[in-house]
Amino acid sequence: MKKTIENKNCKKCSINFEITGEDLEFYKKVSPKFDWKVYEIPAPTLCSDCRQQRRLVFRNDRTLYNWISDNSWKRIISMFSPDKNYTIYEPEYWLSDENDFLTFWQNIENKNSFFIQFKKLNNNIPKRNIIIWWWSENCEYVNWVWSSKDCYLIFNTWLAEKCYYSNNVNNSIYCVDCSFTQKSQNCFYCIDCQKCFDVFYWQNLENCSESFYLKNCISCQNCFWCFNLSNKKYFIFNEEYSKEEYFNKIKELFKIYSLEKYNDFSKNMVVKSNIIERSENVLWDKIKDSKNVKFSFEINDCENIFYSVSCKMCKNCFLCEWLQNKQYCILNKQYTKEEYNKLIPKIIEKMKVDWEWWEFFSANLSPFWYNETVAQEYFPLNKEEILKQNFNYSDYEPPFPKVEKIIPAEKLPKNIVDIPEDILNWAIECEVSKKPFKIISQELEFYRKHNLPIPRKHPDIRHLERMRQRNPRKLFDRKCTRNVSGEVPLGYDECWKNIKITYSSDREEIVICEDCYNKKIY
């Protein structure tokens, strides 16, 4: 049991949060030491949600714009909107020897806070248009991508090929409208899946194939509209059929069942409290092969740089940006080891006076608008709320390319065989946002191959809908085997075990602890 040392009110949202002895022990352990003096890290002044929100404000994964390169004057794609006054370089030039970011150094100004000084540095340094590391081919409209080929509008992904409109689809081929999917092939609208093949629609799957509308299944093949199954084949609505019966029945079911209906159906299903695999002493959700990890999400295989951005293979750097293979730098200025060690304690003392020491960068230092960052995905705000909370905001909308015509989504033929080839020259008006979007030829080929309908929603809306299918990055207290009314559903044993889960108390799913889940499912 963790001992609470102090109760604090978040200085941003005023919510009460605890500081435990374990927290203070960690801060003491990682406190930096300069010139033989330890500079202790203070307890946070923001709650965990506000700290996470502030970090996410600094990351734009998937909002892209047209830009003219400042080094070649060619048209390029950029994650920085044209209404920002930045210098933008193409990756080749940005990484070349001609471009030395030490040339943008700044002297230390004692009169200004160091966050203000860092903002000045950030504004002056040229930006890289998009982030593509290592070898990638035919991946112009992507961002934060590693070693991928023939992809379009994928983000935060590595080793992907022929993947479209997706994020975090690592080591995968032919995945469309997928999120957080690994080592998979020929998948559509899959979320939190791994090692899947020919799976269409849904979530939390492993080693599944040739299936439709599954949730929380492991090693299933040829299953339709199922949940919480393991090592099953030819199942429909969680009931077993012969091979012939299965294929005859799903032909008719495809005509009447849809993703929207499955969403309604799955609200009352039984779910496991947390997804934690092969891990020890961990807390929160989606943690695998880890040890001693607390208050974390989506962690795999986890067990002296300060206040810097996008530095690579650097050490002993402070308030620097975009440096590689450097050390003993402050505000991108090179110092000797002796000078560096003498200056850093003075900087820390100044940051303490300005209430900046060990606070994350202020949100207004972000080079992005709030409404184009990952923060908007996990902490959605409208324009009024964004401005009220002093985040950056812009109404900028890029011009849409010229097309032959724009067709409302509801007028599209429902059957893919009735979609004409010249739809590639049209734009579709999203049925939700009314924003137009286009279909690319590779995408159309995928839909035809798998007999899938043309999407009726803008890629941004589809992405947000997938993100909403994932539980929030938040913990709630609940009791095992209780539904939303606090009652024990029929067919379940009473278990009053307290559990911490990412399902809020108003969710309709029946959430059970891991022990009860294993008894019920396996």
Image: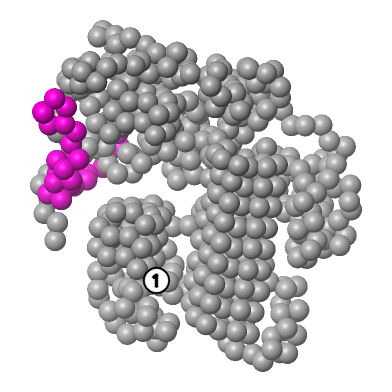
413, 246: nearer the viewer: 246
Q: Quadrant of residue 478?
A: bottom left
209, 190: nearer the viewer: 209
On screen, residue 38 versus residue 315, left or right, reads: left
Residue in the picture at 55% in, 84% down? 232
Q: How is the image coloured?
A: one colour
Residue in the picture at 86% in, 62% down? 417
390, 321: nearer the viewer: 321
Residue of label 1: 272
The answer, for residue 3, to whether it is visible in the render is yes
Q: Residues within 10 Å of mark 1 (few under 14, many from 20)?
A: many
**Image height check: is 263 above or below 516?**
above
On screen, residue 267 versus residue 254, left or right, reads: left
146, 48: nearer the viewer: 146
In percent of width and height, residue 186 lies at 67, 63
The C terminus sits in image quarter: bottom left
Residue 30 falls within the magenta-colored stretch: yes
In percent of width and height, residue 228 lies at 48, 77
